[in-house]
Amino acid sequence: MIDLMSLCAFNASYAHTIDSDALEQWPTFFTEKCKYRITNAENERESLPSGIVFADSRAMLEDRIAALREANIYERHRYRHVLGIPLVGSADDKGAVARTPFIVARIMHTGETTLFVTGEYLDRFERSGGKLLLAERIVVCDSTVTDTLLALPL
Amino acid sequence: MHEQTIHWKSPALTRVPFDLYSDPQTAQEEQDRIYRGATWNYLCLDAELPEPGNYRTTFVGETPVVVVKDDDGEFYAFENRCAHRGALIALEKSGKADNFQCVYHAWSYNRQGDLTGVAFEKGVKGQGGMPASFCKNEHGPRKLMVAVYCGLVFGSFSDDVPPINEYLGPEICSHIERVLHKPVEVIGRFTQALPNNWKLYFENVKDSYHASLLHLFFTTFELNRLSQKGGVIVDETGGHHVSFSMIDPTAADESYKEQGLRSDDSKYRLKDPSVLEGFKEYDDDITLQILSVFPGFVLQQIQNCLAVRQVLPKGIERTELNWTYIGYTDDTPEQRTVRLKQLNLVGPAGFISMEDGAVGGFVQRGIAGARGLAAVVEMGGEGTGSSEGRATETSVRGFWKAYRAHMEVSA
């Protein structure tokens, strides 16, 4: 049985990975054929399918990190994720469905910290080889507006 | 001539005064002369208002506007400002309404923006009420002329604006038509808040010179090379442009290697190249087309990834960029998936466009102490004509040609 504490521990580790700049580890939280998408509440309400990030494989997540490291140009910054308690929809030995609220502050290299985004993860977890992984994470931002750009993942 | 607060050194368009990006009086005059002047401003897609009564609220410059479809199937647009005290008439981004009622004192309007009802117009129990001389049809929010071209709904506050086809010119028309030749539907909407004056973003769109230099992702995967077949078209007014290219995978390209630029890093390869996989859907082999319409509309086709962008000023040093991602209504599920994946290239987190969200801010911050100085816009000479090469700033100069034509007319 996948319990609340294991989901909390998973999310804590996930957030720490991004916030500590261990971005190469970020894709390892997902299954090989995972879905990952960043959208907003208005699009979700209207069932509009696109995302500002849209991935349907772990390799695409790896490519995104490679692009951030090697190709894309943006000012140095980091995030601070603060995650809420997962609301578990269903859970058994093999998988779980949950939703978890988040707030993310963005800390610019210039010293400015701002509230960057709030929202909710809509998650589908799978247990594979004893390890909990995300088969799907839809990141639903509360606001339709992204300030400047979104480089690091949520 | 109208007295300019900002001094252009000459009629030439190769030196752009930095003050234009931060001067409050200029920003105010732009609202009058450009946005409420003789221009067509993108409001929405007709596909977003399928039924009579469907409406959206948007902006022309900073002026709030309602655009709505009436029972006659026509689109109407009017200022989103109650004739009474000036409150917003419609508060939601979109909806469906038989009529509109201001929440403040319940003055009501039909779908064409006519004032049809004044609460307690005759008073209450013989007390109060409007004077008998008050005539409702002398009051109302300002109305816009509306033109629909290829499913794009444009509005204008000015009666002097040319008809939309004439405004766009034949070449811009044909390049809009080649993308919007059949019905589209919205597949997502995102807004990007840009930390810079609106003109810096609109110039960036028109700047075909920067694309392969700033956007490494583009170049690395050979989506865009300056030496590819393609070109830049600038219309006669200068205000509209198309930059386009065709991919030629067999063409060897030495121009980057020769220059030793950062852009040429062939070691970089994708683990899941399906993000770039597409299908041929246009007979003319154009794989990339960026088209702009003065003062703030962009139509984009990057492979199979389609979007319109609306550029709106939000104060002097803030801009809102509204992305509307579209697909064709007759897309197969496979084609739709291709579009959704390619959309990773654009938008606020786009592999090839995230930099555009930041670079305007770099300029805005860079010019903070540059009063009286000017940008150099001389790549490709002084002209504003169309060009076969894209290592040119011709369409940026075209923008300033159109800008000055609107801003320097007699007051």
Image (cartoon, helix red, strand yellow):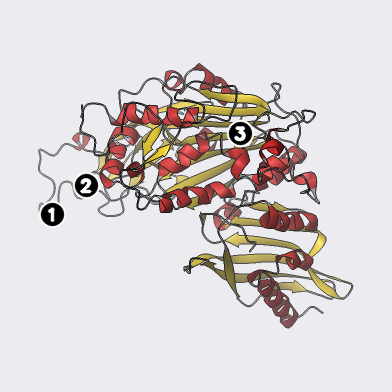
Relative depth, front residue between B56 and A137: A137
In the picture, the disc for residue B187 is: none
Chain holding disc 3: B
Look at label 3 and name its amino acid. Val
The image position of residue A36, as x and y in percent, is 71, 58
Of the two numbered discs 3 and 1 on the same chain, state the one appearing first in sequence: 1
The image position of residue A13, as x and y in percent, is 71, 76
Q: Quadrant of residue A133?
A: bottom right
Of the two numbered discs 2 and 3 on the same chain, state the one appearing first in sequence: 2
Q: CA distance from mark 1 to mark 2?
A: 22 Å
Relative depth, front residue between B401 and B145: B401
Is circle 3 on the same chain as circle 1?
yes
Foreground disc of the pair 2, 3: 3
The image position of residue B33, as x and y in percent, is 29, 33
Residue at point 19%, 50% (across, down): B120
Judge whether B322 appears above or below A151 on screen: above
Q: CA distance from mark 2 to mark 3?
A: 38 Å
Look at label 2 and name its amino acid. His
Foreground disc of the pair 1, 2: 2
In the picture, the disc for residue B125 is: 1
Q: Which residue is mark 2?
A: B84
Look at label 1 and name its amino acid. Lys
Is disc 3 in contact with disc 1, using a CB cutoff of under 8 Å? no
Mark 2 closeness class: few <14, some 14–19, many ≥20 residues within 10 Å? some
Q: Which residue is mark 3?
A: B184
